[in-house]
Amino acid sequence: MNGTNQDRSGWETEEQVSACLVENDVSRAQIARWRRVGLLPDVEQVSKAYRGSAVHYPPGTCKQIVAAARLFREKNRFDYVGRMLWWEGFPVDKRYWKPDLIRLAVWVDRICRLIAPLMHREDDNLPTLPERLSESNHPDIIFSRVRPRLDRKELQSFLRVALDTASGEFDRFEEPERDNRNNERSFDKAAIVSGLDIEASGTHSILGQRLRLKEEIGNTLKALAKAIRTNTFSDVATGPEEIIFAARNDVRNALRIELALYEALEWVYGRQAFGLRFAAWIAKKHPMKMIGFMILGFAQLRHSSNDMLSSEEISQLADQAELVLGYSRKIQQLWKSDPRFRNVLNPRRVREGLRDQPSLNNWKREIAVAARKPPSKGKYSS
């Protein structure tokens, strides 16, 4: 594209891009090819009166080159790199994301329509749909994470709730019953909580604050069922692209929050920290079908509910969560490497210090005392 009067403040220069190519071992021929296949945005050739022309690169080009080079090292395939660049928020040709999202939406809509009639058993001697699915050995990557956490009856209950939600029929969990310890307990809710590995969200806390994933799971499923009744996934996938982009960014930032918090807290609270292990696994592995479903579902929820955080709030929380992760890693490193902090920064003492405000005040004083001690020449490592 040629031009002379457009504002290009923030655009990147030939010198900046050249330095980026050298640092990442990428050739001019490679970026030319990446641009032809839609992995990089177009450049602008700008006329300079009587002095030839200059090439201007859209803002973010260098970051996109760095990301593409990294992704090609992971898997040398255009479709993979294009899909992942789009997931990471870079502009790419729609061939890398839209057809797959539309196909997924059509498939999910078809499945959702089929579920309701299949859930009702006409013959008492025949197994229900949840019973049949619980006996299957489908190699689904998500299902494989849920199955080991549940026994046969719990898995059937988990599937029944999931299928009711997908068909738009979920309204509430079954009425709670008293368990062997005389506690009120809904078996359906317990199966969902166990399957999603969010039990610890009801017990782990920092200064008395909990994530409440366990408490809110029923409302979340109810809202999703309502969204599914209101709109089809195909309507979202074929609708305005800016809605899809916003939902993609929201999902990516939500997963940033969950992964950062999990990695910040796991060394202190254990592998089930705050009920975030399953979400952190999704954030690390990003199974694309699951991610696609989450993007479509998030867009659906935006359409049918006014109770969600804004995109800006979610993004800010993601940035804050990653700051917390940075502080956590520094504390962990001090505990491992500096003998002065061996007793005040170990996981047990951190948990105690974060119990409530008085505990935090006492813990801070202990850390200050430890910091005033002369450094030891030796090294401590756990």
Image (cartoon, helix red, strand yellow):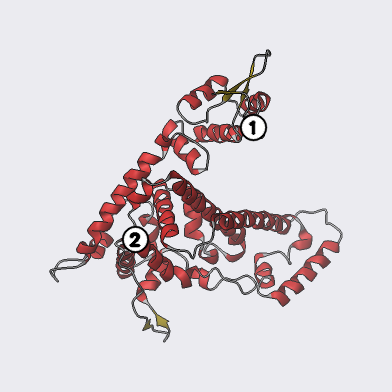
- Helix, strand or loop for disc 2: helix
In this rendering, does residue 286 appear at all? no
Instruction: Find the distance from the CA under tag 2 to the CA under tag 1.
Output: 43 Å
Q: Which residue is mark 2?
A: 230
Work out which residue is located at the far bottom of the displayed protein and give it: 182
Residue at the location (65% across, 14% down)?
Answer: 52
What's under tag 2, amino acid-wise? Thr
> Which quadrant of the view contains residue 241?
top left
Q: Position of residue 148 (x, y in %)?
A: 38, 61
Q: How many labels sit on residues?
A: 2
What's under tag 1, amino acid-wise? Asp
Residue at the location (55% across, 53% down)?
Answer: 256
Q: Position of residue 323 (x, y in %)?
A: 66, 55
Residue 165 placement, left or right of 272? left
Q: Which residue is mark 1?
A: 7
Q: Is residue 8 above or below residue 228?
A: above
> Which quadrant of the view contains residue 181?
bottom left
- Helix, strand or loop for disc 1: loop
Residue at the location (54% across, 55% down)?
Answer: 311
Q: Is residue 2 above or below residue 343?
A: above
Tag 2–tag 1 contact (CB < 8 Å): no
